[in-house]
């Protein structure tokens, strides 16, 4: 993924749109895992904050 990001950032004029489309359609496991980890963390932090408010 880092390599792909670097290509997008530094060689964006040379990127083939069909390749990008294919990656976005077929290789989203890393993005999905990252999204789920962020949502879990936000939920944990939100619940922890609500617990603190309710205990005072």
Image (cartoon, rainbow, N blue to C red):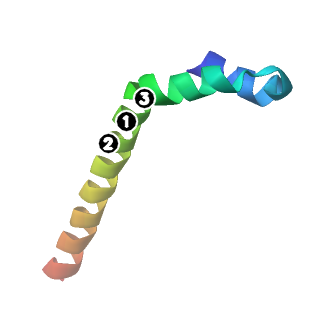
Cα separation, mark 1 vs mark 2, equals 6 Å
Say whether residue 38 is left or right of residue 10.
left
As drawn, the residue found furthest toward the front would be 18
- The residue shown at (17%, 71%) is 51
Q: Identify residue for label 1.
A: 32
Image location (x, y in percent) of residue 55: 14, 78
Q: Is residue 52 above or below residue 6?
A: below
Q: Quadrant of the C terminus?
A: bottom left
Image location (x, y in percent) of residue 45: 30, 59
- The residue shown at (51%, 30%) is 24
Q: Nearer the viewer, mark 2 or mark 3?
A: 3
Q: Identify residue for label 2.
A: 36
Q: Are marks 3 and 1 in contact (CB under 8 Å)?
A: yes
Label 3 sits on a secondary structure element that is: loop
What crowding class fits label 2: few (fewer than 14 Cα within 10 Å), some (14-19), or many (20 or more)? few
Label 1 sits on a secondary structure element that is: helix
Image location (x, y in percent) of residue 25: 46, 29
Count the marks: 3
Q: Are marks 1 and 2 in contact (CB under 8 Å)?
A: yes
- The residue shown at (53%, 23%) is 23
Cα separation, mark 3 vs mark 1, equals 6 Å
Q: Identify residue for label 3.
A: 28
As drawn, the residue found furthest toward the top would be 3
Residue 37, located in which quarter of the rendered image? top left
Q: Nearer the viewer, residue 55 or 31?
A: 31
Q: Is residue 45 above or below residue 4?
A: below
Q: Is residue 34 above or below residue 54?
A: above
- First-in-chain label (2 vs 3): 3
């Amino acid at each position: 993924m880092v390599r792909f990001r670097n290509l997008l950032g530094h060689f964006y004029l040379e990127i083939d749109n069909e390749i990008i489309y294919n990656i976005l359609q077929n290789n989203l496991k890393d993005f999905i895992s990252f999204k789920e980890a962020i949502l879990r963390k936000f939920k944990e932090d939100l619940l922890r904050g609500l617990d603190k408010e309710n205990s005072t």
